[in-house]
């Protein structure tokens, strides 16, 4: 399968006939170059300029819509509609095959090969006569107003660039002659967004935006900056002439112009780009538009970063550390994993064991905290102990130094006993709220984390444990934040929504886990797919 391909398009609507033929042949990236037939003539005569790139914005939008179904990183190169002739075709990724929507004779093939600066040595060229089905109605480029501006500005989150972002950025390029400024919202502005903890770091988003812009049109000047409010540089830069916004943020552009008016600056021309409908929703909780929020939902239950290599840890059994803050839904996830075939060890239950009267840990706790943490029967009152340590960081550290090593030792004992009884070819889930803080993840092949928004966690704690809101918040604040837990996780679940949606995430994670564990067999994977399908059917019934 080809990783990267380029389509040279002289008639945008004809791309539709290409897609069914190439969609299963390309794995990662598809470049599309809009180019008129006369630009392929390779003559020294003066080539008439097509006009401002802005004229072709409708065709660009339609091309992105047509290729949305491919699930590829599609990038439409814009130099072909902006300059009289094309001197070179530059791409960040090496092109392995070139498709052409018209007949590709020897001269054109040679000319394209010369223009393409980053291609494999055995790059293949395929023309329309080799693609068959040449019966689609041919339409030329759609056009609109061709007005352009020297300095264009736009802003957004730009988390994991999707097709809507690419259209927005391309519109800015097509309407610009000199410089584009992009404001990328800093994380502090994003805490109201769905699953904001999964949003890429600001510096990563800035880098991705800049690389995309420089690739689709390298001749413009770009400045991509972080912004900490909705106005960014628009409130004081007198050089800006046009602002590009999505249809849902037009109101924000009006506020920008109000601020500029108060500051004695020119009013910005506003160019609104329609939202892109989401035609392939994965679940009813997703938005009806193509969005980063939908993409983050689809990341739940998938590998966000590869597991760390732990050479000192035996390959088998394969151990998953399941963690998350208080009331994040860990137990519901671990119980479901158990029905799928995992063996679950619960750190809280191990903790109860090490607290038992007569255990070394029991005596160490009494020595450190006194008999005031004991019930009348002599057992440890964990609620009383908790009220002491949760408000005193030094005492909490002392308690942890007593309890954590004991739980670790008991965990290793439980794993050894399980292997002796059931063999190594198994998956063990170790559920522990303090997995990361206690460094128990050193004994796990992967870390899976459950999160919910803090306010949801507080509501659950007060309802479940009968604590006040203040007490619940204090306990929550004593733990790692969602952001810290997500950064350390290989897989993330969010239990905010229905039980069925949580299980859907877990099913996805479980099936992918079977495919990467060293002792999994294809038959086992098929069995797991059948098992998860049965669970989903049960949820719907």
Image (cartoon, rainbow, N blue to C red):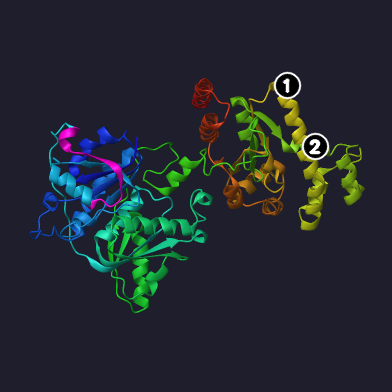
Left or right relative to 397: residue 255: left
- Residue in front for this viewpoint, 78 or 501: 78
Tell me the quarter of the picture where residue 405 sits. top right
Residue under the image location 22 percent in, 47 percent down: 113
Residue 349 visible here: yes
Residue positioned most to the front: 121
- The residue wearing badge 2 is 352
Residue 104, horizontal then vertical, whole percent: 15, 41
Residue at x 8%, y 61% (from the top left corner): 46
The residue that appears at 69% across and 22% down in the rendered structure is: 422
Q: Is residue 386 magenta?
A: no
The range drawn in magenta is 115-131
Secondary element type, mark 1: helix
Tell which residue pokes out farthest to the bottom in this image.
Answer: 264
Q: Dots 2 and 1: beta carbons under 8 Å?
A: no
- Indicate the position of residue 258 as horizontal and vertical percent values: 35, 71
**For this rendering, which residue is in front, 77 or 394?**
77
Q: Position of residue 203 (x, y in %)?
A: 47, 59
- C-alpha separation, residue under disc 2 versus residue under disc 1: 24 Å
Residue 158: quadrant of the picture: bottom left
Nearest-to-viewer mark from 2 and 1: 1
Relative side of 524 to 111, left or right: right
Q: Earlier in the sequence, mark 2 or mark 1?
A: 2
């Amino acid at each position: 399968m080809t990783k990267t391909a380029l389509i040279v398009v002289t008639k945008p609507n004809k791309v539709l006939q290409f897609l069914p033929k190439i969609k299963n042949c390309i794995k990662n990236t598809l470049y599309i170059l809009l180019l008129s037939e006369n630009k392929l003539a390779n003559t020294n005569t003066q080539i008439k300029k097509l006009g401002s790139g802005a004229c072709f914005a409708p065709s660009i939008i339609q091309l992105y819509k047509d290729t949305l179904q491919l699930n590829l990183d599609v990038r439409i190169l814009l130099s072909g509609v902006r300059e009289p002739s094309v001197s070179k075709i530059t791409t960040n990724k090496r092109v392995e095959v070139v498709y052409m929507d018209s007949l590709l004779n020897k001269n054109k093939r040679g000319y394209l090969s010369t223009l393409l600066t980053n291609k494999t040595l055995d790059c293949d060229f395929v023309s329309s006569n080799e693609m068959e089905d040449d019966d689609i109605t041919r339409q030329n480029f759609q056009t609109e107003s061709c007005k352009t501006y020297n300095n264009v500005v736009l802003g957004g989150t730009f988390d994991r660039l999707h097709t809507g972002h690419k259209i927005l950025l391309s519109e800015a390029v097509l309407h610009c002659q000199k410089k584009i400024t992009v404001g990328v919202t800093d994380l502090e502005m994003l805490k109201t967004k769905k699953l904001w903890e999964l949003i890429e770091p600001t510096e990563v988003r800035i880098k991705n935006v800049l690389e995309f812009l420089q690739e689709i049109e390298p001749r413009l000047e770009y400045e991509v900056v972080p912004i900490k409010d909705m106005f960014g540089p628009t409130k004081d830069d007198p050089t800006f002439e046009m602002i590009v916004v999505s249809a849902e943020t037009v109101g924000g552009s009006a506020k920008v112009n109000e601020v500029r008016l108060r500051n004695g600056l020119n009013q910005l021309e506003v160019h609104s780009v329609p939202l892109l409908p989401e035609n392939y929703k994965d679940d009813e909780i997703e938005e009806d538009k193509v969005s980063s929020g939908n993409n983050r939902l689809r990341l739940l239950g998938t590998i966000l970063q590869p597991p760390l290599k732990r050479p000192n840890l035996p390959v088998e059994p394969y151990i998953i550390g399941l963690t998350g803050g208080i009331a994040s839904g860990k137990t519901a996830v671990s119980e479901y994993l158990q029905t799928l075939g995992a063996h679950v060890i619960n750190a809280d239950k191990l903790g109860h064991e090490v607290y038992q009267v007569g255990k070394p840990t029991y005596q160490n706790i009494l020595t450190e905290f006194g008999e005031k943490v004991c019930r009348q029967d002599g057992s440890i009152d964990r609620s009383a102990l908790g009220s002491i340590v949760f408000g005193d960081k030094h005492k909490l550290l002392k308690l942890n130094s007593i309890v954590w090593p004991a739980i670790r030792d008991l965990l290793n004992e439980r794993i050894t006993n399980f292997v002796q009884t059931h063999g190594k070819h198994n998956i063990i889930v170790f559920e522990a709220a303090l997995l990361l803080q206690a460094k128990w993840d050193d004994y796990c092949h992967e870390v899976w984390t459950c999160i919910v928004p803090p306010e949801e966690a507080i509501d659950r704690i007060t309802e479940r444990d009968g604590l006040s809101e203040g007490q619940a918040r204090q306990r929550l604040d004593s733990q790692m934040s969602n952001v810290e837990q997500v950064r350390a996780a290989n897989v993330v679940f969010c239990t905010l929504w229905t039980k069925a949606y949580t299980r859907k995430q877990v099913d996805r994670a479980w099936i992918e886990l079977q495919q990467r564990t060293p002792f999994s067999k294809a038959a086992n994977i098929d069995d797991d797919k059948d098992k998860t399908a049965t669970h989903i059917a049960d949820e719907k019934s």
